[in-house]
Image (cartoon, rainbow, N blue to C red):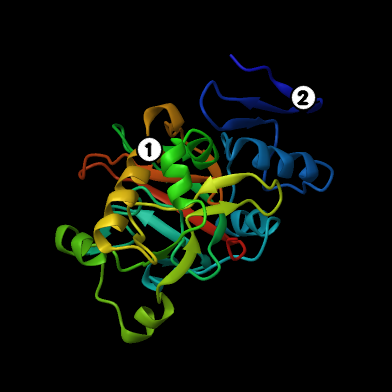
Amino acid sequence: MSAIIKFRPGFSILPFDAPLGAEVIGLDVGAPLDDDFAALHQAHLDHHVLVFRDQHISPRQQVRFSRRFGPLQIHVLRQFQLASDAEVLIISNIREQGRPIGLGDAGHYWHSDLSYKAVPSLGSMLHAQQLPRDGGDTLFANQHTAWERLPDDLRAAVRETRAEHSYLAKYAELQKRSPWRPNLTQAQIDEVAPAIHPVVRTHPETGRLALFVSEHFTTRILDVSAQRSEQVLQALFDHSTRDALVYRHRWQPGDLVFWVNRSVTHLAGGCPPDQRRMLYRTTIEGDAPF
């Protein structure tokens, strides 16, 4: 068991016995956090996934807390915005009057949120609203450690390369299997034009290197043959999501989870379709990877 890190009476960080992640103890994120924010910011740099238990906050409070880390980004599927707070994306398998109220297949493949944008996400926050009895876990893989443990030949092959990321890479495939992927307008397609990013990115605050590819959005490595690109990407996908790199989050009522998209990829574990699941997501803008 990792040692608890105390900052003041009632506020501490408990790192998980896992490749990443920590629980934040004693903070109500709906309250002012001026005196504690520097420690909280350092914890997110150190642990990449922070879990705040038993948070009884409104969507507006979630938006306000998320903005402490930067401007918020709006997802292209605006029909799944929360009506009262456009910055909140509804992640849900629930249907009302036969229509989905949220994005029910979010996280079906390993990915980093909004890596398909020219300016991807710094991080995301997900707040539990309704949880299924069975399943519904979220898995997070440490991409700093993935880079550090990459075999030398693969490391040499990708260190100076760039790759294309596209929101549409798996869209048609997902659309065939679920009701949560509507047809996109031309304006929406234009909004998610493919972006080019380094395969290995540098964290702008810590300087640590991390792999920055995912099976959901990364389509090809530039300046190599299609065959070579596919071969290398598959090797990276397999390596970067090994069990030894993964923390599995088992949701509890009131959980708020904050993860760093610069440092991790994540995957939704899925749940039975007849069990209701709903979470609210906010997404914080980051910087152009380098």
In the image, residue 13 lies at what x, y percent? 68, 28
> Which residue is outermost to the left?
176
Q: Which residue lies furthest to the bottom in this view?
A: 186
Mark 2 vs mark 1, CA separation in Å: 35 Å
Of marks 2 and 1, the one in the foreground:
1
User: Is 280 placed above or below 197 here?
Assistant: above
Q: How crowded is mark 1: few (under 14 residues within 10 Å), some or many (20 or more)?
A: some
Label drawn at residue 111: none
> Residue 33's x, y, as percent?
77, 46
Give 188 or 132, whichever is nearer the viewer.
Answer: 188
- In the rendered structure, the answer to whether residue 200 lies left or right of residue 269 reads right
Residue 128 in sight from this viewpoint: no
Tag 1 secondary structure: helix
- Circle 2 — which element? strand
The mark found on residue 6 in the picture is 2
Q: Quick check: 212 left or right of 51?
A: left
> In the figure, 260 relative to 141: above or below?
below
Q: Which residue is drawn at 30% across and 34% down?
A: 135
Q: Which of marks 2 and 1 is nearer the N terminus?
A: 2
Residue 126 or residue 186, whichever sits in front: 186
- Name the residue located 52 percent from the left edge and 57 percent from the top edge: 160
The answer to whether residue 166 is left or right of residue 257 is left
- Kindly identify the residue that appears in the image at 84 percent across and 43 percent down: 35
Amino acid under disc 2: Lys
Q: Is residue 252 visible?
A: yes
Which residue corresponds to mark 1?
Answer: 239
